[in-house]
Amino acid sequence: DGDDGSMVHEQILASSWPLFFFILRDRMAAKPEVIPTLLPVAQELISTVQCNINRESSSILLGSLSVILESPDIHSAKLESIEFLWNSTSELLPTFAENFGLIPARRASIQSSNQKHESGTENAIIQAEVKAFLGIFSFVANGIPRKPFSDGPACETLFKLGIIRTATSLWSSEISSSSHDSVGFFLLSCAFRSKAIASYVSRLKSFEHQLLCLVEKSQIAEEKLWKIVLSVHELNRSEETNTLICDLESFLSLATVSMYPSMRPWIDFLEFMSRPFVIRLLLTWPYLEKLVILLRKLKSSLSSATLKTETERAGAEDAMATKDRKQRVCLLLKRCLCSLSGTSINKFD
């Protein structure tokens, strides 16, 4: 009877453990302070049921960690919880790296398949997995909470595990996929944190083509940021940097004309430039002073100019939206200039 009861218990656990796990996941997403207590329980649950974390269970962990990281409550969580989550996620990186490395082959299999319906379903699954992987890898790339300058070594770990290699493969071969931009942005963030990664990506045969694709898709900000990171890491020639400065001047000056009423390229550019790990790297750039001059010039132009755009002529509501975007750019400029000059934002003129 004891053996029968144990067997029934195991069967119930084997069929119901995902439900228990998802209850734990939702609890952690809603209350991040319980992560140090519940995350080990969730991992132990998987290990107990499946003996070890295999591909199936790691997929469940992948999706669950993604849900937790996307929770709005995670941004206000205590550092202890974030640090515990970071350490636990880092321990799973080898398994995640292995499964992430299978995606290019799975992509190739889809492209050679004649079953359009099945291919579409599998492609959607892969797209969701890539998004989840990138969210987790980006979280790890931020480095250990409460430990300054740990993001560089964290990115080096991603590099050693083959994660960067797989990401570049997806970036080079999946230009038309919906995940292409996210992969490129992830690589750009890692490149700013690691000269080795920047060098590796810049040596790709398709790298120049990728930059052209960014321009064609009006992702001008990202194209400029790639050129900046190569210059800061001294991976290009001095004449290329001189050309870059001229390009930046032209790019920034376009913010005062009606070519892009949404002002999205400059918002994207300045939001990225304001990130601490980017500021930290720019402070070592020999061309920093020239960059600051260009940013100050743009701030002055935006402060004094009245933007005459098609949207302003279309109606008051669109004009207000354009004004709000202009103010957003001015605020980002101020934040970026304060960080680069070491001035308090309250004292900055």
Image (cartoon, rainbow, N blue to C red):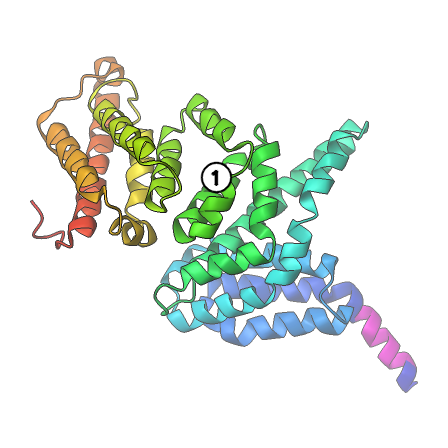
Percent position of residue 166, x then y: 61, 46
Q: 179 left or right of 1?
A: left
Percent position of residue 5, x then y: 87, 80
Q: How many marks?
A: 1
Percent position of residue 335, x then y: 20, 47
Q: 97 left or right of 231?
A: right
Which portion, as a residue range, is magenta? 4-12
Residue 147 in which image quadrant: bottom left
Where is 149 relative to 37, above or below?
Answer: above
Residue 17 in which image quadrant: bottom right
Which residue, given by chain and number where applicable, does mark 1 sit on? Answer: 202
Q: Is residue 157 magenta?
A: no
Kind of element beneath mark 1: helix
Majority SS type along the magenta span: helix
Is residue 60 visible in the rendered image? The answer is: no
Q: 269 left or right of 70?
A: left
